[in-house]
Image: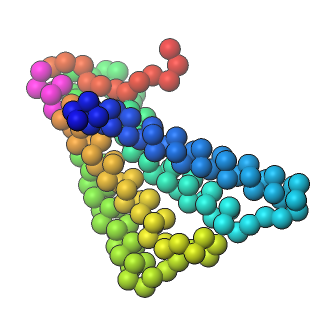
Amino acid sequence: MSNFLSALDRNMERWALLFFYVLLVVTMAVEVIRREVFAYSSIWGEELVRYAFIYLVWIGAASAVRERGHIRIDVLMHYLGVRAKAALYIFGDLVMVAVALIALYWSFETVLVSAKFGSVSAGLRVSMVWFLMAVPVGFTIMLWRLAQSLARDFKSFRDGTPVYEGDTLFD
């Protein structure tokens, strides 16, 4: 069980991103073939691609938090010591936690309103709650990754070790 949870922690976003990306590409390819070859398209295909893309974005944002892949200005970081750099990362993560908590609250409010009134999507005729949940799910994963990042940064600050700055894109 511990190995499963460890693998889930390492790869949760990757598996979810793979699922939604494949869903998006396959659905889009089917719809293009249907439109160009058979001169017929469906309303559900466009809707499914749109909502898969929304999930892709929010889960991808959480994945970027884990890898410290979000855009940041790090000119000063090169001139700071190890502890000062860790303190700055901690401050940035705390600001992101505050923003994520506010966004989680308001996005969940939207989900509750949709559930209360029973709104459904136009093409798929599925409850909008499933699609609106993309934002709270993304921010929940983001908060989990921020908690892990803060723990890692506090340890770096305490021990005086170099802080994790994310994987490099090209090496």
What residue is drawn where x is 49% and y is 72%? Answer: 128
Q: Residue at x 88, y 54 (%)?
A: 37
**Res 139 → quadrant:** bottom left
> Foreground: 63 or 162?
63
Where, by quadrant of the figure, is residue 162 drawn?
Answer: top left
Horizontal side, residue 126 vs residue 149: left or right: right
Percent position (x, y) of residue 5? Answer: 26, 37
Q: Note whether 77 is above or below 108 in the view shown.
A: above
Quick one: which residue is furthest to the bottom in this view?
117
Which residue is located at x 38 percent, y 83 percent? 116
In this view of the protein, can residue 95 be seen by the observer? no
Image quadrant containing the N terminus: top left
**Residue 118 figure quarter:** bottom left
Residue under the image location 22 percent in, 42 percent down? 147
Q: Is residue 83 above or below residue 133?
A: above
The percent position of residue 77, horizontal first and vertical second, equals 33, 26
Q: Which residues are magenta?
A: 154-159
| Residue 2 appears in the rendering | yes
Q: Nearer the viewer, residue 32 or 134?
A: 32
